[in-house]
Image: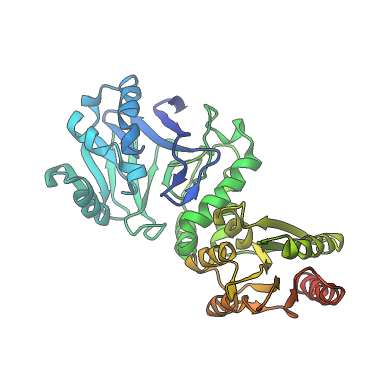
Amino acid sequence: MVIRKIVENVFYIGLDDDITEFFEGIWPLPWGVTYNTYLVLDEKIALIEPGVREELAMRYISELESVVDLSEIDYIVVNHSEPDHSGSLPLLCRLTKAKIVASKFGVNLLRGFYNIAGERLVGVSSGDSISLGETKLRFISIAGVHWPDSMVTYETKNKILFSSDAFGAFGSLRGAIFDDEIDKTFYLEEAKRYFVNIIGKFAGNAGKAIDSLSSVDIRIIAPAHGPVWRTDIDLIVNLYRDLSNRMVRDKVTLIYGSMYGFTENLAIYIAGRIAEKGVEIEVFNVTHTHPSFTMASAWDSKVVVFGGPTYDNDIFPPLLTHVDYLRSKMLKNKKYALFGSYGWSGKGYRRIQRTLEELEWELIEPIVEFRGAPTSDAKRKADELIENIVRAIKG
């Protein structure tokens, strides 16, 4: 548990979770995740984001009591009702007399999740505010980022944006909570993976939310997960804006699977030749990689290359899993290429084609398919494919 002062009357109270293996039961957390909550002290006291999962609630409450008498909390602001943001709320409801503030949609969710009495719940609309004394908390809807209840809270005195899932990142913080204390390269990469995995399907909503906040004077961004941004806030804002707008780089993502090494041989050949031509490429073996990582790479790649053997007259199942994850996030309008081996029957790649056609992806030819180990003819076709991929990148 970490308690840090952000400004004179605003405190960070956060918990590193290095126990949970999969966020939302889906996304791997090899470097953990943080649950960030914030305490605003004024004539009245507000707790922003009563976070942490239910299993960690007692530990969180114990630390919170070291900073504030729970009976003195006037408001608990729930920017987003998902249980990783609100898991400790039932306990806080019993231990405090605070009003629970959420969007009107969020109020309905909280009532359903935790059976909270109606008189405790205060539903707010975008633009509403609550005065704490010298400062006000202003609420701004960011519905659809990534739930319909989502909002952000703006603290007017110190110009802090408590941004909920927006501008969040995976990764535990280990006590260093501010962007000027951390390895920004690492957390920006984990912010990208967080965005694609959690918010990606609703990228358009995220873009609208960022635009709606452009007129707000923001000095500090305090998200529900990941670092607090106080020095280089443009880094995280620009990253989220680019991801929301589905901006692409001159980059290739190569995603392959291989049963006995035949497809892998050509995957390494293709990757090496593309790199030799000065094109950035990221390579993933689906047997050892969760789709969380391949999706994050493919999101801003101009071309995605899939390689896999035919298996039971179909495509290699682990590779298909990665394609299905891309479909689930509605990642559209990419260019792609296909290659792979077969034994007694080929054309398993057709399943991938059908899925990507639905997403309006454009095939770069030729499709390189070969029986067994890569033949000289297969490598000639691969060379032609590589030239066309490079042309698609640089053209």
When asked about the image quadrant of residue 49, the answer is top left
In-front residue for pair 181/219: 181
When asked about the image quadrant of residue 141, the answer is bottom left
Q: Give the position of the C terminus as an image quadrant.
A: bottom right
Residue 38, image x, y percentages: 38, 34
Residue depicted at 55% across the width and 80% down the height? 354
Residue 214 appears in view: no
Residue depicted at 42% across the width and 57% down the height? 145
Residue 41, image x, y percentages: 33, 28
Residue 252 as seen in the image, left or right of residue 15: right
Residue 283 as seen in the image, left or right of residue 215: right
Residue depicted at 70% across the width and 62% down the height? 254
In-front residue for pair 37/353: 353
Residue depicted at 34% across the width and 21% down the height? 67
Q: Is residue 207 above or below residue 181?
A: below
Residue lying farthest top?
66
In-front residue for pair 209/14: 14
In-front residue for pair 9/165: 165
Residue 140, image x, y percentages: 36, 52
Q: Give the position of the N terminus as an image quadrant.
A: top left
Q: Is residue 194 above or below residue 91?
A: below
Residue 171 appears in view: yes
When asked about the image quadrant of residue 371, the answer is bottom right
